[in-house]
Amino acid sequence: MKFDITNIDKKKLLKTLFSHSFPTNHGVGKVEYLVRKDRGENVDSLTDEECEDILFNFNTYSDILPQSFRILDYYKGKPIKIVFDKQKNGRILVDSCGYDSRNGKYMFLVAMLNEFPKEEIFIVRKKYLPYTLSEIKDMDYLSKEEEAYFKNIIASSTKKQNSFGSYWQL
């Protein structure tokens, strides 16, 4: 799925995605998370200062680099996998595939729904890319009923149009 995040609070977005992310059960991310936690570091939330540092890089380099800019890969051992895609028209899009492939199907949407009013959530692509579906197929984060619930939310979204193009609103 792909979301237009142009008009939402980016710090709030980073914080909610981070808080809804889980360290993987294998690999370096889990080790980093556990080591940091054992040291007493805050591994379950982001501070405003951390968000400002992350966004500073995007704001500094987004005008001189190609339109895609990786905001976070793993942070404090948690897989975030967020790329901000700055469009020529100034819009900023985020594909949820990287995040959802590590944290579970629809988890990006879950995080958005937990923090933002539905009126602020603009979906510009409703489907997952085929490779993402194969990556998250084995994850059992949602029950069949929960997955059906989110499929229904997406299916019942309303298609709208603005000067930037088509989108769906929940």
Image (tube, rainbow, N blue to C red):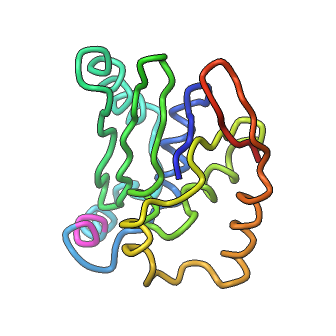
Q: Is residue 89 above or below residue 54?
A: above
Residue at image point 34% right, 33% down: 54
Q: In this view, does 97 lie above or below 149?
A: above
* Residue closer to the observer: 106 or 13: 106
Expressed as whole percent of the image width and height from the top left, the position of residue 118 reads: 76, 44
User: Left or right: 74 with respect to 163?
Assistant: left
Q: In which quarter of the image is residue 144?
A: bottom right
* Residue closer to the observer: 135 or 29: 135
User: Is residue 77 inside the magenta stretch?
Assistant: no
- Give the magenta part as a residue range: 29-33
Question: For the stretch drawn in magenta, what is the main secondary structure?
Answer: helix
Q: Quadrant of residue 49?
A: top left
Q: Quadrant of residue 41?
A: bottom left
* Residue closer to the observer: 65 or 114: 65
Expressed as whole percent of the image width and height from the top left, the position of residue 168 reads: 70, 42
Expressed as whole percent of the image width and height from the top left, the position of residue 142 reads: 61, 78
Residue at image point 38% right, 36% down: 50
Residue at image point 34% right, 65% down: 37
Residue at image point 61% right, 55% down: 109
* Residue closer to the observer: 98 or 20: 98
User: Left or right: 56 with respect to 123?
Assistant: left
